[in-house]
Image: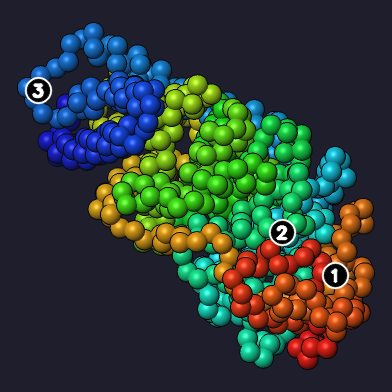
């Protein structure tokens, strides 16, 4: 049945958009591969981008005849029948594989980790299960939480901080770094300190650039660094971690989270358990869902994206060789392996070329993952679906567009280098083959939209074609709905068909906006020095765990700061760093006191190298600085 003229005009418009997107993405991919080949050294490193480009173009071409035949213009030349048949078979195979493979691995990981056991925050059975898992650990590892902070809503930040201290993990083993990407005592910083000090007043003269305290039994280090971007803050924080002897253990774990993340109570335990069971794993990411404060279509749409993109795609990547992105919002890495990658990750990287800027700064989490994958063996980067958290999602289209522009440019720049790496092709060939096929099907979402439109306009295509197109989609929708119900995200089941119709347009506008702002450098700035600057130190110590909110049970973990008296001393300002005679006299401080110590450090050495173990505070016996 021939479509009416008005329908052909609309179909022509849709196919024009699809072909434009098709050409734009193909050109960007080839441009990225050319850059990867130019900067590579060695025959194989220069040859691999070329071979990956050939594979991409072959797979990409499979979609072109299908788009071409939908052009509603009479008299256009036709492809030979054998080309159409060959392309059709390849297209159907890729289409079914790209739909069914993620679902298959999603089911495998769901059963492996028993994702139905911890779907509800605060459930007593979940908390009890977490405590049992801690008891079963061979050794309770040190847990270092790193949270960069910049321009966050105070309520969201405080909620994120409280979600850390309510985790069912031994508090004595947790150290939290809250690192502000600003050296000012902002309203956000003061609001946070009001909470951390239980409503305490701001010290006379202000807080130092670093504040150390114990809040609800957990040790916190609050930094204020000069503005330089997320990676800059991570570098300065990591320098402190690396120089702190109390954190240098064989099994120390680093948990990276964003300042708008709300951790589930068992998130740390789930990560630690998974890494404890599989020593080959060096890093893992978890499952994040959208924190919808009220019913809102835009948040529900993003929640559907999060579920399908994480539960299925990350499970598939993990099963094929390794997750390609450890997001800074929720990632755990072993400190030992991170230290090796940090030598490159935190070095002075050349960002004169805008493509490198996208790779190192907009996609800094993917770049770190790439370094870990190249230095470790296959299957070293995993996915733990039971390590869960909620995150604040963009509430407006403008916020969403800016976020996805950053994600797209960062992901694209890093994924090109993934596919250009001979080492990764040797270690995880199926993973990179899947990634290439996934790249090749970009811009084809409009095909489904056009088919839907043709059916609505009265077209009657072949039943076999309809079956091949819609049967896998219906099967995928059914499985997504089952997962959504199990994970208490039932709205995702309703949103998936709408997401399928909206995604082509959303992706198209994001692509246009990303190309239009290609040269915009809007994510922080280059880090000029990885060494921590001299700082004011303010130690505000609440040494009494709150019995009503303390989650630490009687684990047999040594922690000199909890349940004991503390020696308070002041470092002498002499050149050799020795202590004066008056400073040698120990000052005993009862644990029910709150001690505030301010110290000015004007020398050029790093803070971390001067401080001793975290439970020991420093001040002099004859100083008049300490006050209650």
- Residue at image mark 1: 545
In the image, residue 212 sits, relative to residue 495, either above or below, namely below
Mark 1 and mark 3: Cα distance apart in space: 77 Å
SS state under label 2: loop
Residue drawn at x 53%, y 24% is 427
Query: The C terminus appears in which quarter of the rendering?
Result: bottom right
**Image point (19%, 26%), residue name:** 68
Q: Quadrant of residue 111?
A: top right
Label 1 or label 2, whichever lies nearer to me, is 2
The N terminus sits in image quarter: top left
Residue drawn 79% across and 88% down?
623
Q: Which residue is mark 2?
A: 244
Considering only order in the chain, which callout, 3 or 1, is on the residue closer to the N terminus? 3
In the rendering, at what x and y percent does residue 159 appear?
A: 65, 66
SS type, badge 1: loop
Instruction: Give the residue number, with chain letter if any, for mark 3.
Output: 76
Residue 141 vs residue 405, the one in the foreground: 141
């Amino acid at each position: 049945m021939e479509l009416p003229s008005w329908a052909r005009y609309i179909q022509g418009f849709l196919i024009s958009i699809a072909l434009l997107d098709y050409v734009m993405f193909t050109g960007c991919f080839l441009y990225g591969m050319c850059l990867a080949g130019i900067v590579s050294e060695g025959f194989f490193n220069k040859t691999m981008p070329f071979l990956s480009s050939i594979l991409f173009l072959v797979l990409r071409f499979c979609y072109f005849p299908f788009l071409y035949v939908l052009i509603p213009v009479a008299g256009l030349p036709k492809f030979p029948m054998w080309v159409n048949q060959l392309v059709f078979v390849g297209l159907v195979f890729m289409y079914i594989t790209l739909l069914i493979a993620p679902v298959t691995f999603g089911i495998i990981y769901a059963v492996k980790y028993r994702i139905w056991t911890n779907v509800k925050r605060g459930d007593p059975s979940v908390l009890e299960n977490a405590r049992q898992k801690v008891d079963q650990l061979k050794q309770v590892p040190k847990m270092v939480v790193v949270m960069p902070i910049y321009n966050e809503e105070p309520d969201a930040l405080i909620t994120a901080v409280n979600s850390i201290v309510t985790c069912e993990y031994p508090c004595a083993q947790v150290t939290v770094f809250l690192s502000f990407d600003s050296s000012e005592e902002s309203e956000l910083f003061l609001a946070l300190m009001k909470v951390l000090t239980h409503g305490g007043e701001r010290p006379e003269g202000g807080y130092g650039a670093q504040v150390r305290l114990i809040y609800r039994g957990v040790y916190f280090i609050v930094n204020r660094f000069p503005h330089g971007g997320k990676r800059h803050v991570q570098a300065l924080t990591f320098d402190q971690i690396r120089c702190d002897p109390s954190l240098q253990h064989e099994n120390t774990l680093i948990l990276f989270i964003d300042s708008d993340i709300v951790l589930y109570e068992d998130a740390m335990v789930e990560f630690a358990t998974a890494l404890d069971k599989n020593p080959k794993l060096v890093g893992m990411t978890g499952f994040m869902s959208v924190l919808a404060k009220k019913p809102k279509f835009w948040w529900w749409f993003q929640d559907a994206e999060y579920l399908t993109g994480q539960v299925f795609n990350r499970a598939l990547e993990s099963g094929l060789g390794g997750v390609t992105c450890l997001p800074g919002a929720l990632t755990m890495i072993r400190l030992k392996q991170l230290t090796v990658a940090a030598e490159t990750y935190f070095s002075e990287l050349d960002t004169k070329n805008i493509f490198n800027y996208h790779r190192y700064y907009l996609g800094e989490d993917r770049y770190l993952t790439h370094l870990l994958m190249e230095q470790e063996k296959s299957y070293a980067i995993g996915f733990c679906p039971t390590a869960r958290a909620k995150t604040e999602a963009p509430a407006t289209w403008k916020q969403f567009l800016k976020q996805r522009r950053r994600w797209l440019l960062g992901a694209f720049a890093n994924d090109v280098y993934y596919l250009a790496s001979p080492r990764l092709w040797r270690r995880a060939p199926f993973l990179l083959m899947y990634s290439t096929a996934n790249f090749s099907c970009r811009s084809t979402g409009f095909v489904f939209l056009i088919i839907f439109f043709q059916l609505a306009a009265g077209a009657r295509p072949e039943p076999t074609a309809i079956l091949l197109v819609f049967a896998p989609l219906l099967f995928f929708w059914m499985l997504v709905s089952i997962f959504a119900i199990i994970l208490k995200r039932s709205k995702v089941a309703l949103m998936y068909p709408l997401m399928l119709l909206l995604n082509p347009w959303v992706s198209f506008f994001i692509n246009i906006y990303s190309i239009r702002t290609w040269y915009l450098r809007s994510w922080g700035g280059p880090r000029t020095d990885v060494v921590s600057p001299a700082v004011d130190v303010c130690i505000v110590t609440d040494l009494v765990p709150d019995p009503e909110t303390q989650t630490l049970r009687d684990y047999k973990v040594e922690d000199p700061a909890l349940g004991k008296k503390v020696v308070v001393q002041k470092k002498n300002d002499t050149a050799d760093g020795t202590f004066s005679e008056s400073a040698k006299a120990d000052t005993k401080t009862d644990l029910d006191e709150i001690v505030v110590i301010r110290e000015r450090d004007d020398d050029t050495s790093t803070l971390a190298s001067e401080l001793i173990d975290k439970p020991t505070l420093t001040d002099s016996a004859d100083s008049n600085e300490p006050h209650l």
